[in-house]
């Protein structure tokens, strides 16, 4: 009996790692499946939940695995402290989830990217600090010619684990401060201007910080006791994150948020190599790869290269050359005048932009669309990939308002509809509707795919003023014969349009 129990116990211990790996594999499958569901607006909520379950499974398995190893004699992890940390984090997350409005999601996403970056930096540095005494003893033992260090065998860490520590620190630090600057720009904090901040020698400083940090990251595998390299890498990375993002204007924030998201994933993958944790490597790689793919999609949507986004400084002020000034006189319409035209339409395409987000007008827009639908008017929404301040910003706002998925049309689908559209209602979308992108070679947005709203029979544009968009150029759409300007807060104007329809 005792022999059988010992044999069973031995098998159980031997199989523990296999069970952990299988659970990690299950978590990875949930991540990948959830990511697949996130590609569709209709299934995004389900995908988010499945990915969250995968993350919970991975965290629980890791917690018990590490605690089991700790009880074996390496070090002790207190469930009490972990519970306290979980409680604090959960409370903060719950408060933010409840308090932060949907219009504040870009800022929220930027902060979450930053937290992921600093977590990777701290994990890498903490792991190195824990290992440093043994590393120093291993180096000393290798130099010793006698047995003064006793019979204990100390092993030097592998070069790849040391390199991973340096890279996790570098990428994590860049992600953290870069995300904080992005948050400040998105939030409109006065300490960080929304426009690009550029100065002489900025690119040279960025190159120096980047190349110097990379060089030091390769020094660490050569001399694992060189703790000072991590100090310098950390400082340089934090400065580098600031330098990379302050030179980018508000118009490019969707690309920046996507890129920082990718950085946070790559930093997490590096932390996974540091900890020899396969699920962290898989998760970080998924986030890093998807972020890079999305960044590429966003750049193509603006017809610009990533280098131009990072160092071009678009949005720094009025453009020099074509497209910078007015192209005629704009016609101003009142909600009453526009209401008459809308009432006679058979198809209306709504083009939401950042103006809708600022005014938090998504619910008012949905009510307006429902009133049009009750009048047997076909309603569709034209969504440009870079409208707003983060990837999918308009989709998120409209989904939060309960707009039917079937009414949403992407760039190509919408452009195929405009020639059959009676009224295109543009709500603050400026640069993404500027016809200059099609023909003005001197314009900074030349070649950027736009929504061809000017091809609709009538265009109404809701804006607070005639001020140019983030690219710093005036929109020639506003001066076309089929365009009418309705000035005012987007929510107030849309509400007034709905009231006009109800009054008939």
Image: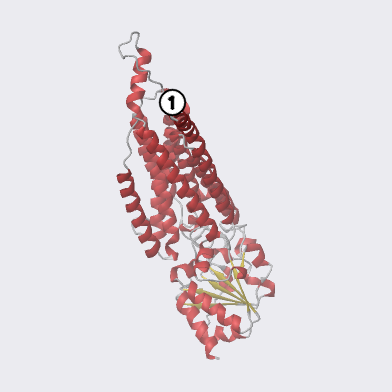
Image position of 168 with respect to 37: above or below? above
Q: Nearer the viewer, residue 132 or 442?
A: 132
> Can you see residue 242?
no
Q: Say how many tags the image has.
A: 1
The residue shown at (69%, 67%) is 416
Q: Is residue 30 left or right of residue 272?
A: right
Q: Secondary structure at mark 1?
A: helix
* Residue sticking out furthest to the front: 1
Q: Is residue 332 left or right of residue 453?
A: left
Q: Which residue is mark 1?
A: 221
Residue 300 in percent (x, y) is at 60, 53
> Can you see residue 338?
yes
Q: Is residue 416 left or right of residue 32?
A: right
Q: Nearer the viewer, residue 353 or 10?
A: 10
Q: Is residue 67 left or right of residue 339?
A: left
* Crowd band around label 1 with a 10 angstrom C-alpha radius: few (<14), some (14–19), many (20+): many
């Amino acid at each position: 009996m005792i022999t059988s129990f010992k044999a069973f116990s031995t098998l159980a211990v031997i199989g523990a790692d296999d069970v952990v790996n299988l659970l990690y594999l299950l978590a990875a499958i949930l991540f990948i499946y959830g990511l697949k569901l996130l590609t569709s607006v209709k299934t995004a909520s389900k995908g988010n939940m499945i990915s969250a379950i995968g993350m919970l499974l991975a965290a629980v398995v890791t917690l018990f695995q590490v605690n089991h190893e700790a009880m074996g004699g390496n070090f002790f992890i207190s469930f009490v402290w972990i519970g306290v940390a979980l409680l604090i984090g959960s409370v903060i997350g719950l408060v933010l989830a409840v308090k932060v409005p949907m219009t504040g999601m870009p800022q929220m996403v930027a902060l979450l990217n930053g937290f992921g970056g600093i977590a990777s930096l701290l994990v890498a540095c903490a792991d190195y600090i824990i290992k440093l005494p043994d590393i120093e003893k291993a180096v000393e033992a290798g130099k010793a010619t006698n047995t003064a260090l006793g019979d204990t065998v100390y092993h030097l860490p592998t070069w790849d684990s040391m390199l991973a520590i340096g890279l996790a620190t570098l990428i994590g630090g860049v992600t953290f401060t870069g995300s904080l600057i992005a948050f400040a720009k998105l939030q409109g904090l006065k300490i960080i201007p929304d426009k690009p901040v550029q100065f002489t020698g900025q690119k040279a400083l960025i190159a120096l910080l980047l190349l110097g940090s990379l060089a030091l990251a390769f020094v660490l595998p050569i001399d694992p006791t060189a703790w000072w390299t991590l100090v310098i890498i950390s400082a340089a990375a934090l400065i580098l994150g600031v330098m990379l993002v302050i030179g980018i204007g508000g118009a490019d924030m969707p690309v920046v948020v996507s890129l920082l998201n990718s950085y946070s994933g790559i930093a997490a993958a590096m932390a996974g190599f540091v900890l020899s944790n396969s699920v962290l490597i898989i998760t970080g790689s998924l986030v890093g790869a998807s972020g890079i793919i999305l960044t590429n999609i966003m750049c193509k949507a603006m017809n610009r290269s990533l280098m131009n986004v990072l160092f071009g400084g678009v949005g720094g002020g009025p453009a020099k050359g074509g497209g910078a000034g007015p192209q005629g006189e704009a016609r101003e319409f009142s909600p009453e005048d526009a209401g008459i035209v809308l009432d006679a339409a058979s198809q209306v395409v709504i083009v939401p932009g950042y103006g809708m987000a600022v005014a938090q007008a998504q619910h008012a827009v949905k009510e307006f669309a429902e009133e049009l639908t009750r009048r047997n008017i076909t309603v569709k929404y034209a969504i440009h990939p870079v409208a707003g301040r983060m990837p999918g910003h308009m989709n998120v706002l409209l989904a939060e308002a309960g707009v039917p998925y079937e009414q949403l049309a992407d760039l190509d689908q919408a452009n195929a509809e405009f020639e059959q559209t009676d009224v295109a209602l543009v709500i603050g979308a400026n640069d993404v509707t500027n016809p200059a992108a099609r023909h003005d070679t001197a314009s900074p947005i030349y070649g950027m795919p736009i929504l061809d709203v000017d091809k609709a029979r009538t265009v109404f544009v809701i804006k607070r003023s005639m001020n140019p968009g983030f690219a710093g150029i005036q929109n020639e759409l506003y001066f076309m014969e089929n365009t009418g300007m309705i000035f005012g807060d987007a929510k107030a104007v849309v509400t007034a349009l709905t009231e006009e329809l109800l009054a008939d």
